[in-house]
Amino acid sequence: MQLTVSKRTPGKKTEIKKIRREGNIPAIFYSQGKAGEEIVVNGIEFNGLVKQVKPGCLSTTVFSLKIGGKEIKALLKDIQYEITTYNVIHLDFIELVENVPVNLNVPLQFTGTVDCIGVKPGGILRPVIRTVKVSCLPKDIPTEFELDVRDLGIRQSRRLSDIKMPPEVRPLSSLSEVAVVVAKR
């Protein structure tokens, strides 16, 4: 996902309000070993790209930022919303360095929920964990993990160890944790 950004002068609230009035989003870009660089993200472009991202997968989406003629790969580390309108008011990006592992939360998607054996007689599918914290190189970042719940009966569960995780992705969460359970009504 490619975003065009521009540098901005640090600081004043009046400048930040002007940026937001113009439909853009103030942001900070963090590089390893450097102070945060203040930037402006095109609001229309960002909102258009976010609509293309599968729900829940924004934390694993790699953005390509064009800053001063250079193209830099980055992850969205934090997003702030206005309370009443839910408009994006601030973003934090972190640079992805090729050989440096990154820690992130990968969303967990449950497949086969419609055909779940335990739900048909009246059970309720209850997700316990929605994301899995992992460490991997930027080139190996998974967009999501899938966990099939089709054959779960009432009072049965799936653990994080049931996820098919690539060998280059190292889990930071305990794999013995329960990810989803079919509860009795």
Image: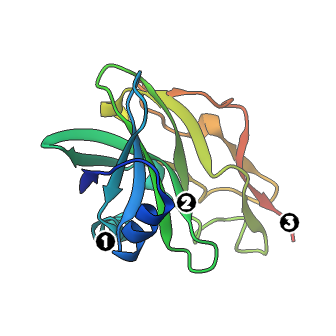
- Where's residue 163, x and y in %? 55, 40
**Residue under label 2:** 80
* Residue type marked 2: Gln
Mark 1 or 3, which is nearer the eye?
1
Specify few, some or many for label 1: CA neighbours under 10 Å numbering under 14, 14-19, or 20 or more: few
Viewer-nearest of labels 1 and 2?
Answer: 2
For badge 3, the amino acid type reads: Lys
Q: Residues within 10 Å of mark 2 (few under 14, many from 20)?
A: few
Answer with the quarter of the image where residue 41 lies: bottom left
Q: Nearer the viewer, residue 167 or 130?
A: 130
Taking 32 as reference, is 119 above or below it? below
Quickly name the residue at label 3: 184
Residue name at image x 30 percent, y 32 percent: 139
User: Residue placed farthest to the bottom in the image?
Assistant: 85
Which residue is nearer to you in this view: 57 or 21?
21
Which numbered mark, 3 or 2, is in the foreground of this view? Answer: 2
Please report whichever mark, 3 or 2, sits nearer to the chain's N-terminal start.
Answer: 2
Task: Tell me which residue sits at (68%, 49%) in the image.
Answer: 129
Query: As drawn, is 70 to the left or to the right of 9?
Result: left
Label 3 CA crowd tier, 10 Å (few <14, some 14–19, many 20+): some
Provide residue 97's location: percent of width, then percent of height: 32, 26
Q: How many marks?
A: 3
Helix, strand, or loop for circle 3?
loop
Q: Image point 36% across, 70% down: which residue?
A: 47
Q: Earlier in the sequence, mark 1 or mark 2?
A: 1
Rounded to the nearest angstrom, the CA distance separating label 1 from label 2 is 17 Å
**Quarter of the figure that contains the C terminus:** bottom right
**Circle 1 sits on which residue?**
48
The residue at the far left in this view is 69
**Residue at left offset 63%, top offset 56%:** 151
